[in-house]
Amino acid sequence: MQIMIRATAAMIVALMALAPVGAAAQTTETAAAPADSAGEDPVGLGAEVVAGLSQAEETFAARMTQIQETLDQTRTDIENAEPLFDQMIAAIEEQAQLGDPTGAFVESLEAYIRDIDALADEAERQGDTEIAADLRKTAQGFETARDRTIKIHSDSFRLIREIKADKRRFIIRKQAKLAAKALTVAEEGVKRLQGVLNEIREIRATVPTSTGVSQ
């Protein structure tokens, strides 16, 4: 961005340096111009400067619009931090509830345990002890899965209760992070505006004051 601004300023400075600064100079240059030069740009940089300014303005304005939109959205997120927190809690509770000891998932695991134990019993009656041992091991695997599911459910809701108890602290911390993000974006906007000011100062420096001293 700084390169673009300085390039724009350089074009303006070049144009200002080549342009006449008074009525006498304008009269002299008009008199000195060839008769067949009517309609031509005596400087040769006018269109280029205008095009450069237009492009720089569009790029600058587009980025400042993005910055403003980000600031507005982040402020909305800060204001909505509490309802967003509540939505988050509702979502994780719904997911964690799938591991409920009385829920369909655990009931399915227990059904596998019963069925596989019954198969192992039958295998033993048939004298196929090797298959029976494998089935017992599989049933133990399902028991482990069931027990882990129940513990996961218990631990999940214990943590959810702790999060709810510290609701305000969680919300404030989230808002603090969003505010820090907004500051970073705002500082970029200030830096870009400072670049515009620097460009204006360079342009102003090319124009003599009423006392003939450049600012």
Image: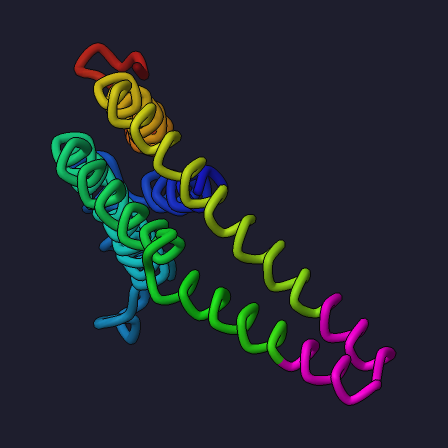
Front residue of 15/185: it is: 185
Q: Is residue 205 visible?
A: no
Q: Based on the displayed image, in which of its 4 quarters is residue 85 positioned?
A: top left
Magenta span: helix, strand or loop, mainly?
helix
Q: Is residue 142 above or below residue 200?
A: below
Residue 99 position in % (x across, y down):
40, 54
Residue drawn where x is 74% and y is 84% of the image? 125
Q: Is residue 171 left or right of residue 43?
A: left
Q: Is residue 4 visible?
A: yes
Q: Quadrant of the N terminus?
A: top left
Residue 17 position in % (x across, y down):
37, 38
Residue sitting farthest toward the bottom: 126
- Range shown magenta: 119-137
Q: Is residue 134 left or right of residue 2?
A: right
In magenta segment, residue 18? no
Residue 206 position in % (x across, y down):
34, 28
Q: Based on the displayed image, in which of its 4 quarters is residue 211 positioned?
A: top left
Query: Looking at the image, what colour scheme do you see?
Result: rainbow
Front residue of 97/125: it is: 125
Residue drawn where x is 17% and y is 15% of the image? 210
In magenta segment, residue 132? yes
